[in-house]
Image: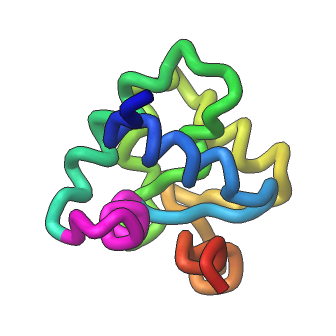
Amino acid sequence: MKTSIYDLIYDIVRHIPKGRVTSYGAIAQSIGTGGSARLVGWAMNAAANLHDVPAHRVVNSKGLLTGKHHFGGDTMQRLLEAEGILIKDDQVQDFDKVFWHPNELID
């Protein structure tokens, strides 16, 4: 059975712990496509109907909720806040403290 790049991305996203976030670029780097953060964004957009993929935990490299429009309204923010992540002006607060790097799967 052949695994698609999206399946690989979804597997990583499923491992992001509750109360933590990662970035599109960190995921891209961890799968060896460092310059393809946009590809990860497309995968998150396509994951809208995959309830086991916590796409709300993926933000941009500065902690901004750039994918929030794919969730509708303030859904992305509400989901993150329900996990204890503070958001102000569409940005994760204490980003360095809640950031999870996919390389932690390897360590």
In the picture as drawn, the residue positioned furthest to the left comes out as 35
Task: Specify the color scheme.
Answer: rainbow
Q: Is residue 37 left or right of residue 100?
A: left
Image quarter of residue 6: top left
Image quarter of residue 27: bottom left
**Quadrant, the C terminus:** bottom right
Q: Where 35 sits versus 50, above or below?
A: below
Image location of residue 80, percent across then percent down: 71, 47
Q: Which residues are magenta?
A: 24-34
Tell me what residue is drawn at x 51 percent, y 52 percent: 58
Does residue 99 appear in the picture of this structure? no
Please tell me which residue lies in front, 80 or 41: 41
Image location of residue 105, percent across then percent down: 64, 72
Q: Is residue 75 left or right of residue 32?
A: right
Please tell me which residue lies in front, 67 or 11: 11
Q: Where 49 sits versus 8, above or below?
A: above
**Quadrant, the N terminus:** top left
Q: Where 99 sits versus 84, above or below?
A: below
In the picture as drawn, the residue positioned furthest to the front comes out as 1
Does residue 17 appear in the picture of this structure? yes
Q: In the image, is residue 26 part of the stretch drawn in magenta?
A: yes
In terms of secondary structure, what is the magenta stretch mainly? helix
Q: In the image, is residue 65 part of the stretch drawn in magenta?
A: no
Q: Is residue 52 left or right of residue 4?
A: right
Please tell me which residue lies in front, 62 or 53: 53
Tell me what residue is drawn at x 47 percent, y 66 percent: 63
In the picture as drawn, the residue positioned furthest to the top comes out as 49
